[in-house]
């Protein structure tokens, strides 16, 4: 089937159980822990095998594109993600290489996935992707991209087998556009959605976030 | 060791490989998929075994607490999370029971974890927790909690073995408080962090989010 399929929409053709010993990227583990009452309990964990020396798996690039004559925008990426069996809408992101700093990975991965050269303006502490289930974590790097009026859209520098579409979205429309993507069948990533939802809440309810005094 | 430990700080005492067949909650799988060029590839996936009929694993409660004489706030929960080996700061959240709607799970879990009775004002589309690694997904329910001036702090209704601390944070301080929690060694959940970071970005850079025209 694989060798005869014509180019087209990706699809998952089979899913089978995988022993951790045969996996390259992730593993399934059982932790035994002592709770606050001194009782021994167990918890099931999915972990990455690739965590580097810094203890941080990944970096996501919350990016802001400034252009002299266009509204401020952000670039999101669309790609087929086998774990969800569909196309996702996410901020550019990637695993941090061994001995790489989050900021270095952010600039490198942004360039590879989008072609843009950005400047990291802030880095979050390591935050937990889904701490009830996995040790996987990431830093959110906010990245500025400053364009000139006549800058052409840059070329991507994708790894072999990567197929990533870029979509530029005005920041003022981000939340609405993510809702629309979801209605069209795309799977929006929780982290990007939460950032956009936070923006939207602050824009619609500014009185809730005013500092006292 | 488990049977003799005194009450105190929880800790993970061992982590061992777990075959999917012996796991109750999650599983490790290998997906074979056809990419856009028609080539067969594989991807490793961690999935929940508990996904209900609606196809959504979990719900997180982005909550806003209104009080007649206190600043608007949100309640976050702190608990020991074995996957990250430490205490996390998250919005209340939980798995959706079979045949339960996200909004029903949101009200139920908020009550169990915090004691508060809330009203769901919006529900996100299902969003992907970490789509490069897992099929796990969730809905973000925004929940309003309206308190009277003399309402006492309610009691939690935790399951056996749950030990969850509640912290009420004024919304205007949320981002700063999450940064402080991280400095103190707590692990902040990515989704809550992204929401707070989105709020902060909109508060600090309102000009970026103004609609044209």
Image (spheres, coloured by chain):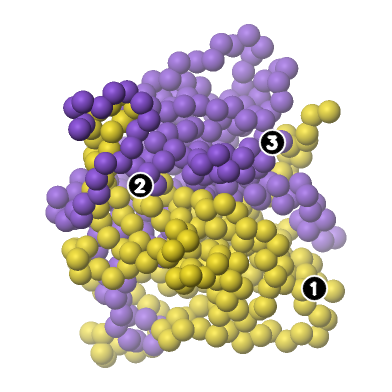
Chain colours: A purple, B yellow
Chain letter for the residue marked with disc 1 in the picture? B
Q: Residue at x 74, y 50 (%)?
A: A202
Q: Residue at x 64, y 14 (%)?
A: A148
As helix, strand or loop, the secondary structure at mark 3 comes to helix
* Front-lying residue, B94 or B15: B94
As helix, strand or loop, the secondary structure at mark 2 comes to helix
Mark 3 = which residue? A173
Residue A165, placed above or below residue A37: above
Are there few (<14), some (14-19), or many (20+) residues within 10 Å of tag 3?
A: some
Q: Are marks 2 and 3 on the same chain?
A: yes
- Answer left or right for B54 relative to A81: right
Residue A90, placed above or below residue A132: above
Where is residue B23, by image quadrant? bottom left
Residue B146, placed above or below residue B132: below
- Answer left or right for B1 relative to B127: left
Question: Are the residues flagged by discs 2 and 1 in contact, CB closer than 8 Å?
Answer: no
Residue A61 visible somewhere in the drawing: no
Chain letter for the residue marked with disc 3 in the picture? A
Where is residue B145, by image quadrant? bottom right
Q: Position of residue B50 (x, y in %)?
A: 37, 66
Q: Position of residue B128 (x, y in %)?
A: 47, 50
Q: Residue at x 63, y 9 (%)?
A: A150
- Answer left or right for A5 relative to B171: left
As helix, strand or loop, the secondary structure at mark 1 comes to loop
Mark 2 = which residue? A83
Q: Are marks 3 and 1 on the same chain?
A: no
Chain letter for the residue marked with disc 2 in the picture? A
Mark 1 = which residue? B67
Residue A79 visible somewhere in the drawing: yes
* Front-lying residue, A192 or B136: B136
């Amino acid at each position: 089937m694989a060798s005869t399929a014509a180019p087209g929409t990706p699809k998952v053709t089979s899913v089978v159980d995988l022993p951790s010993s045969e996996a390259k990227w992730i593993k399934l583990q059982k932790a035994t822990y002592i709770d606050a009452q001194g009782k021994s309990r167990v918890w099931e964990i999915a972990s990455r095998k690739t965590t580097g020396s810094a203890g941080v798996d990944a970096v996501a690039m919350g990016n802001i594109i400034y252009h002299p004559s266009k509204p401020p925008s952000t670039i999101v990426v669309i790609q087929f993600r086998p774990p969800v069996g569909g196309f996702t809408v996410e901020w550019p992101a990637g695993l941090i290489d061994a001995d790489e700093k989050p900021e270095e990975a952010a600039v490198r991965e942004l360039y590879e996935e989008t072609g843009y050269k950005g400047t990291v303006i802030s880095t979050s502490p390591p935050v937990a992707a889904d701490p009830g289930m996995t040790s996987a974590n990431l830093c959110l790097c906010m990245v500025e991209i400053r364009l000139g009026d006549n800058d052409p859209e840059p070329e991507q520098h994708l790894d072999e087998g990567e197929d990533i579409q870029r979509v530029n979205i005005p920041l003022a429309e981000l939340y609405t556009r993510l809702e629309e993507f979801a209605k069209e069948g795309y799977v929006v990533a929780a982290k990007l959605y939460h950032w956009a939802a936070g923006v939207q809440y602050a824009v619609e309810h500014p009185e809730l976030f005013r500092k006292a005094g």
